[in-house]
Image: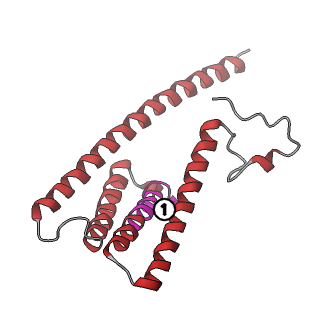
């Protein structure tokens, strides 16, 4: 996709929402709008639940909503912690993945228990929860690993071409 044409505007920073170093593309604008809108929707939902609790007390539906929100927010925070946090830069990808998987599973299991996503007296429901989590984690890991390897190969090829070009220019 082509970057947004900022030549008509005197100050391109006026067009930026988050980060002025990222070029504006239709895809990035949609992503930013989606994530901003999602954040606003979550804030509105939490406020409405809080108002409802103030008037009528908390009910099971509200507890379920709050635990789903908590699971989503925790997932984003844990993702940042395990994959983007500078202290973890020395850890290999398998270690990070295992750490993320274990901590996020603990959060999801806690939210599922508190929010009664599953019947607490049915071990088969909990077993299927565990299996479903592991299958989803495996699929996402496979897809991400594929893209990392593909992009890594592309970057290595471009780096080799660049070095070859630099070497040729040095000998001229």
* Dominant secondary structure, magenta: helix
> At 19% from the left edge and 52% from the top edge, which residue is drawn?
131
Q: Which residue is labeled 1 in the image?
A: 87
> At 52% from the left edge and 24% from the top edge, which residue is drawn?
157
Answer few, some or many: residues within 10 Å of disc 1's Cα (few below 14, many 20 plus, some between 14 and 19).
Answer: few
Task: Give yes or no for residue 85 being in the magenta stretch.
Answer: yes
Farthest residue, direction front: 56
User: Element type at marker 1?
Assistant: helix
x and y, in percent, of residue 154 in the image: 50, 27
Q: Which quadrant of the figure has residue 113?
A: bottom left
x and y, in percent, of residue 21 in the image: 70, 46
Quarter in which the N terminus is drawn: top right
Quarter in which the C terminus is drawn: top right
Magenta span covers which residues? Answer: 70-87
x and y, in percent, of residue 159 in the image: 57, 28
Q: Which quadrant of the figure has residue 10?
A: top right
């Amino acid at each position: 996709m082509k970057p947004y044409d900022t030549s008509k505007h005197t100050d391109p920073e006026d067009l930026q929402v988050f980060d002025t170093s990222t070029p504006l593309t239709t895809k990035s604008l949609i992503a930013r709008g989606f994530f901003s809108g999602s954040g606003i929707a979550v804030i509105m939902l939490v406020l409405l639940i809080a108002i409802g609790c103030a008037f009528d007390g908390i009910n099971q539906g509200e507890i379920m909503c709050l635990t789903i929100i908590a699971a989503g927010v925790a997932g984003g925070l844990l993702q940042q912690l395990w994959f983007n946090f500078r202290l973890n830069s020395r850890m290999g990808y398998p270690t990070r993945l295992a750490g993320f998987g274990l901590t996020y599973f603990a959060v999801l299991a806690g939210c599922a228990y508190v929010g009664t996503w599953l019947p607490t007296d049915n071990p088969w429901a909990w077993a299927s929860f565990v299996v479903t989590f592991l299958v989803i984690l495996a699929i996402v890991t496979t897809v991400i690993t594929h893209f990392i390897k593909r992009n890594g190969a592309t970057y290595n090829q471009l780096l080799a071409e660049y070095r070859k070009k630099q070497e040729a220019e040095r000998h001229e």
